């Protein structure tokens, strides 16, 4: 290698150290930037020049310095895929846990203000009436506690129905967010494709895209597959949400209130084809599981099953009470009518009402008995002790939701732990350590100074060769 070649070699080391310092500065500057992936300069040694001819035989030739080949993102796609999967599972579990906890809290059980306590007050008022069937105040107490019970059942149903409607609205919002993210991923894919094709660096653009693919995973799960041109595809249920630079859209369909859930279940589908998308993770999947219609087996969505439970409770209460009181007479000897009525045009839980306005209209006595007979009222008061009572049905409903809530909470804790672990692995691989960058910066500074010193030394050699060779002895 010529002396001038030594200058070129030193210069490549100088520029490589400068670029490495630039990359380190970029890392340090973005140490707190969300989604930023640590970068590292990629270099390789330049080979020695080819030697041709016998005059070169036996000549030892060093390499020609260092070649900068690019700037690498320190990321692991397998780890990123694990983070997306864990994010989707955690989002689904969190959605279900939060909703079920709110539902369970709405029961207000056990407490003095819960439905169980209200049932006890209602049955106790009938017991009091059976002891004094001609007492007007005892009759009015039965009506008052009945109205309070009716109101509490209606309120419970409304709470479940409102939760269902709110979650249904969130599904629409989630679908919109998926579409927005898909459009942004497709646009970033296009820019990344063009940047890479022109020889540029798209690292920061890829960081932005990774954040968006994780957002899609949080919303709807899915998988990400890379393409050779630097773009990625995003798939939901095996179909393309993002196909390189093209985005497809999704939409939520189905009932807008819980009363229509059975006839029109809430689903996610492709906007273009109408094909239903089957997803099992992400916020949308968690919401769809909760929005599923009630079924006869009681294994449908928790919110619809709870609403159906309130309706069954209203029907059972009205049926059992009316089934007793309508067989007898009032304390005035008149034939007794139904105590409860249900509006057939409304859900039973909100259509339930007390059908009478006066204590004298309550059927307390058996047919043909004397006015002081309270046998029917006593029979009504004993309904709560039956294994088939509304109280027992209510207890089963509360226990079912509590069990589901506890299971969802445990799953949330498990998936959250898995996500934390996956994120920690990703951070250890891709996040910026300012301590490490500081060490790298000192190393790169020393490399820069050393390369500069080589250039200075070679320059001095050339100065001696050019300006001082052959001048010895000249006066």
Image (tube, helix red, strand yellow):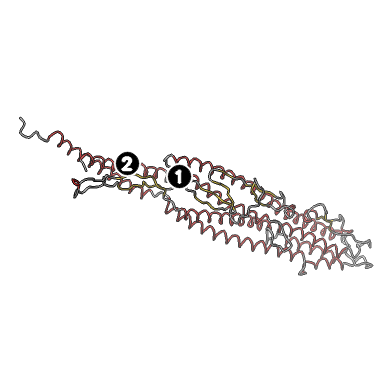
Q: Position of residue 310 (x, y in %)?
A: 74, 58
| Residue 209 location (% of width, % of height) | 50, 45
Residue 18: give its label.
2
Q: Measuring from the top left, give residue 273's x and y in whole percent.
A: 66, 47
Q: Are marks 2 and 1 in contact (CB under 8 Å)?
A: no
Q: In the shown orientation, is residue 209 left or right of residue 20?
A: right
Tell which of 391 and 21 is nearer to you: 21
Camera-nearest residue between 202 and 296: 202
For marks 2 and 1, the one nearer the N-term is: 2
Q: Secondary structure at mark 1?
A: loop
> Rounded to the nearest whole Å, what is the CA distance between mark 2 and mark 1?
23 Å
- Judged from the image, the secondary structure of the residue bearing numbered disc 2 is helix
Q: Position of residue 26 (x, y in %)?
A: 39, 42
**In the picture provided, is 327 more to the left or to the right than 257?**
right
| Quarter where residue 96 is shown | bottom right
Residue ID for mark 1:
33
Which residue: 40% across, 47% down? 72
Q: Is residue 83 above or below residue 377?
A: above
Q: Nearer the viewer, residue 289 or 472?
A: 472
Question: In which quadrant is the C terminus drawn?
Answer: top left
**Relative horizontal placement of residue 429, taking residue 102 as reference (left or right):** left
Q: Residue at x 66, y 61 (%)?
A: 401
């Amino acid at each position: 290698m010529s002396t001038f070649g030594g200058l070129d070699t030193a210069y490549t080391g100088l520029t490589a150290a400068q670029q490495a310092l630039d990359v380190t500065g970029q890392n340090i500057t973005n140490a707190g930037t969300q989604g930023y992936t640590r970068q590292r300069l990629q270099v390789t040694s330049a080979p020695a020049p080819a030697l041709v001819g016998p005059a070169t035989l036996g000549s030892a030739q060093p390499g020609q310095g260092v070649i900068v080949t690019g700037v690498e993102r320190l990321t692991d796609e397998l780890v990123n895929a694990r983070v997306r999967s864990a994010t989707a599972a955690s989002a689904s579990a969190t959605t279900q846990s939060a909703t079920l906890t709110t539902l369970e809290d709405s029961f207000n059980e056990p407490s003095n203000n819960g439905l169980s306590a209200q049932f006890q007050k209602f049955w106790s008022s009938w017991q009091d009436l059976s002891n004094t069937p001609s007492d007007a105040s005892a009759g009015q107490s039965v009506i008052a506690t009945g109205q309070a019970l009716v109101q509490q059942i209606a309120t419970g149903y409304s709470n479940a129905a409102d939760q269902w409607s709110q979650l249904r609205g969130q599904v629409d919002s989630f679908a919109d967010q998926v579409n927005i993210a898909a459009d942004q991923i497709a646009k970033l894919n296009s820019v990344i494709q063009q940047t890479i094709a022109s020889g540029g660096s798209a690292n920061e653009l890829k960081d932005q895209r990774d954040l968006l693919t994780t957002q899609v995973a949080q919303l709807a799960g899915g998988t990400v597959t890379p393409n050779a041109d630097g773009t990625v595809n995003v798939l939901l249920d095996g179909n393309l949400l993002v196909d390189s630079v093209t985005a497809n859209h999704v939409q939520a369909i189905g009932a807008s209130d819980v009363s229509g859930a059975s006839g029109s279940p809430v689903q996610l589908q492709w906007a273009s084809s109408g094909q239903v998308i089957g997803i099992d993770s992400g916020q949308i999947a968690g919401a769809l599981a909760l929005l599923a219609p009630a079924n006869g087996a009681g294994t449908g969505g928790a919110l619809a099953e709870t609403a159906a439970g309130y309706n069954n409770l209203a029907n059972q209460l009205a049926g059992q009470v009316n089934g007793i009181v309508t067989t007898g007479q009032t304390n005035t000897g008149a034939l007794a009518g139904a105590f409860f009525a249900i509006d057939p045009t409304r859900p039973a839980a909100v259509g339930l009402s007390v059908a009478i306005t006066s204590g004298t209209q309550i059927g307390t006595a058996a047919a043909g008995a004397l006015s002081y007979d309270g046998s029917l009222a006593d029979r009504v008061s004993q309904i709560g002790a039956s294994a088939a009572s509304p109280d027992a049905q209510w207890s089963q409903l509360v226990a079912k939701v509590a069990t589901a809530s506890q299971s969802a909470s445990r799953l949330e804790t498990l998936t959250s732990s898995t996500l934390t672990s996956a994120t920690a692995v990703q951070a250890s691989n891709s996040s910026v350590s300012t301590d490490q960058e500081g060490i790298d910066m000192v190393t790169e500074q020393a490399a820069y100074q050393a390369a500069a010193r080589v250039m200075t030394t070679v320059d001095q050699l050339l100065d001696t060769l050019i300006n001082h060779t052959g001048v010895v002895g000249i006066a």
